[in-house]
Image: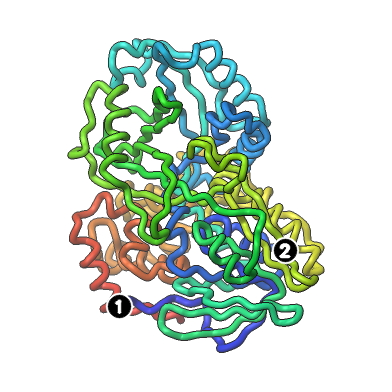
Amino acid sequence: MAATPYDEAVPLESDCELLVVGGGINGAGIARDAAGRGLSVLLCEQHDLAAHTSSASTKLIHGGLRYLEYYEFRLVRKALAEREVLLRSAPHIIWPLSFVMPHARGQRPAWLIRAGLFLYDHLARRELLPASHGIDLRKHVAGQPLKPEFRRGFVYADGWVDDARLVVLNAIDAKEHGARIHTRTRCTALLRDGQYWRATLQHGDGRQSTVRARAVVNAAGPWTSDFLQQAAPGNHRQHVRLIKGSHIVVKRLFAHDHAYIFQHHDGRIVFAIPYEHDFTLIGTTDLDYHGDSARVEIDAAEIAYLCALSSEYFSQPIVPADVVWTYAGLRPLVEEAAASQEDAKAVTRDYRFELDQEGHGPPLLSIFGGKITTFRKLAEEALDLLAPLLGNKHGAWTENACLPGGDLFGSEPSNRSVREFGQFVLALQRQYGWLPAALVARYARAYGSRTHVLLAGRSSVPEMGEEIAASLYAAEVDYLQRHEWAVSADDILWRRSKLGLHLPPETAARLESWLQDHPYKNT
């Protein structure tokens, strides 16, 4: 493995006010919020940022239309409000997406769907997205790939997100507010020591260090219950229920830019979403999971299920042989006693906190549940709870702050950045006319205004360094190592980007060899 790009040399012992365990979206969001409030923060993640749950979502910023069926009005309202906040804060990695819901006999009546969509439109203030409406699929472009029996449909809007990059941007912002971010670093022991926690960290290169913290956040995702039991043995109110969600990717099934939401007779839904220009993403499943949390894979039955359900709608049948890539992840949802026998799809996507202050000792806050759309609100509420215990009075701040790269037309989040992203891309392509326009467009989507950092001091293609693979230059790899904690080929090809989908299979080995031959130096 290439050298781990630590922010700084790791001391054998160090202090911080807040130790965050877990580098998924909740951990990164909490570290960002806490550092911005002036707290000294250290985040440790046993693998890469977004290595598990947070890179395996359906990649939607949405209120959760189907949660209305379970009367989760508070959760949907909160998520819809956050949808607007996030669209403005990171318009390069989050953007509007229209969904088409074909209607068929035997499904919920049309009037009920219209009523649900009206409620979805009006539960929270909406400035950036259009209202829902009905369509004639025989005349609408979205009807062309569907079977002819689907004549009527509904269109509503939500948001798309590059989920793994969202985690990374939160970690970058945390670092720029003073946090220390340590990937490939596992917290192997956590003990109370008077008014402090004493944590033992095992780093990926074999080093071990000790951190003394005034408070700890357990944002370990699928490992939350295990970590809590390790740190504070005993009976706890909250537990994690692990639900596996799997996705398949096939070659592009339709030419337009709408997504689809398909209903199954068992009440489940599946999305079919334009993905990476050349592909269609289909998912997800909802299955209880009891295996190894570090080794989660789609199985043949899930692939068959997603293919069969999609084929009920699309004119072109989809078979397992069409699948070019798959991914699966665990949703660490809240296990509620009353819902322990409920079908996985009905388990709440809301979040819960458990605060442990045994004997008025240092606090341990464990995070249970949540969804990517509400991560910022979760982090804000977590810090509103913890900050007073640490004597911090800074207050919430992230609602009106851009994530790194999101400040396209000024430092404040704005509707303009969402509505005029295309103009931003065109201006960037003119400024860097010596690069292929398609490459600049990819940089704009990945890095936003930070594209200027990536390209600083360069004015020709030779100055980008070696082209390690098609459109992947040494300059970008250096940027990802220097600013985004990228270490391995998988980090670069599958989490910092999805270049792995577009490049030949042997690219990973070639890139890994290149990384070994060009060890990262933190200068």
> Disc 2 marks which amino acid?
Arg
Colour treatment of the image: rainbow
For residue 230, above or below residue 240: below
The quarter holding residue 350 reads top right
Residue 152: quadrant of the picture:
top left
Badge 2: few (under 14), some or many (20 or more) residues near its Cα, within 10 Å?
some
How far across and how far down the image is residue 433, in percent? 35, 52
User: In the image, which disc is placed on residue 132?
Assistant: none
* Residue sitting at the far bottom: 12
Q: Residue at x 26, y 78 (%)?
A: 517
Q: Residue at x 62, y 48 (%)?
A: 351
Which element type, helix, strand or loop, lies under badge 2? loop
Label 2 or label 1, whichever comes before in sequence order:
2
Per the image, label 1 sits on a secondary structure element best described as loop
Q: Position of residue 156 (x, y in %)?
A: 51, 24
- What amino acid is found at the position of numbered circle 1 in the picture? His
Q: Is residue 468 left or right of residue 419?
A: left
| Residue in the foreground of this view, choosing between 410 and 98 | 98
Alpha-carbon neighbours of circle 1 within 10 Å: few (<14), some, or many (≥20)? few
Can residue 278 be seen at all in this image of the molecule?
no
Residue 138: x and y, percent?
34, 10
Relative depth, front residue between 142 and 233: 233
Q: What quarter of the picture does the N terminus occupy?
A: bottom left
Residue identified by numbered label 1: 518
Spatial separation of the CA atoms under disc 2 and disc 1: 37 Å
How many discs mark residues in the rendered view? 2
Mark seen at residue 37: 2
Q: Nearer the viewer, residue 299 or 68?
A: 299
Task: Give above or below for 190 relative to 158.
Answer: below
